[in-house]
Amino acid sequence: MADESRVMVSGQEVAILAGGCFWCLEAVYDQVLGVEAVESGYIGGTQDNPTYEAVCGGQTGHAEAVRITFDPEVISYKELLEIFFVAHDPTTLNRQGNDIGTQYRSAIFYCSPAQHQIAEQVMKSVTDEKLYGDPIVTQVVTAIRWYEAEPYHQEYFARNPFQGYCQFVVGPKVAKFRKQFAHRLKS
């Protein structure tokens, strides 16, 4: 189901991030204090109503992404981006590990001018702090039409913790997040 990207929803804000497989980012942000909801989906392409198979085929232009609804009184957009830059490798163009293609690109889809400014500031900070040896290749682009992924992708890690990809790819990213951002975990 498609809908327009939302900025504010009854006191909450929305962030849209792409950092490789959406299962990884969803599993991380589901655990963040102040995050109300995380949806896996597709954004940034030209095909209406894309399917997972079409997106994985690399012909739609869409990225696998997550739409995060959060309470800015509990966690800021800046803090969500700081987690984002730890939860994936922002230095590999169109790739995360063995996942290769534009659908796995690193991107921040901003929903407002303020989010755009914050995204640029956080990227500059990450670059200035030399957190990575290689240059950051994360795109910062306007959020356009959002398409929610198929139901079986939602809460994938929570429902399939023993699936191979979840154990060897998603699990280690979640563990890294939990170690580095213990103060941000839901109880």
Image (cartoon, rainbow, N blue to C red):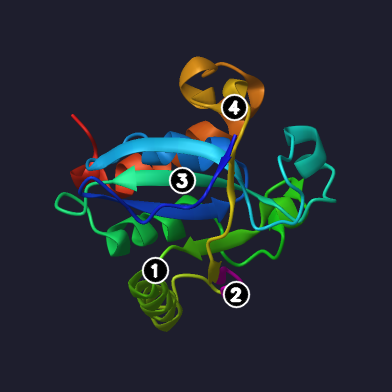
* Category of crowding for the residue at label 3, using alpha-carbon neighbours closer than 10 angstroms: few (below 14), some (14–19), many (at least 20): many
Residue at the limit of the structure toward the front, as seen here: 3
- The Cα atoms of the two marked residues, 3 and 1, are separated by 14 Å
Residue stretch in magenta: 136-140
- Identity, as a three-letter code, of the amino acid under mark 2: Asp
Q: Earlier in the sequence, mark 4 or mark 2?
A: 2
- Identity, as a three-letter code, of the amino acid under mark 1: Ser
Tell me the mark number nearer the camera, choosing from 4 and 2.
4
* Category of crowding for the residue at label 2, using alpha-carbon neighbours closer than 10 angstroms: few (below 14), some (14–19), many (at least 20): few
- The Cα atoms of the two marked residues, 4 and 3, are separated by 13 Å
Residue drawn at x 33%, y 40% is: 178
Q: 73 or 82, which lies in front? A: 73
Circle on res. 67: 3
The residue beneath circle 4 is 153
Task: Name the quadrant containing residue 160.
Answer: top right
Tell me the mark number nearer the camera, choosing from 3 and 2.
3
Q: Earlier in the sequence, mark 1 or mark 4?
A: 1
Circle on res. 134: 2
Circle on res. 79: none
Q: Earlier in the sequence, mark 4 or mark 3?
A: 3
The residue beneath circle 1 is 112
Q: Position of residue 142 (x, y in %)?
A: 53, 68
Residue drawn at x 59%, y 53% is: 145
Q: Secondary structure at mark 2?
A: loop
Residue 2 horizontal side relative to residue 75, left or right: right
Q: Is residue 41 visible?
A: yes
Residue 112 horizontal side relative to residue 171, left or right: left
- The Cα atoms of the two marked residues, 2 and 1, are separated by 28 Å
Q: Earlier in the sequence, mark 3 or mark 1?
A: 3
Tell me the mark number nearer the camera, choosing from 1 and 4.
1
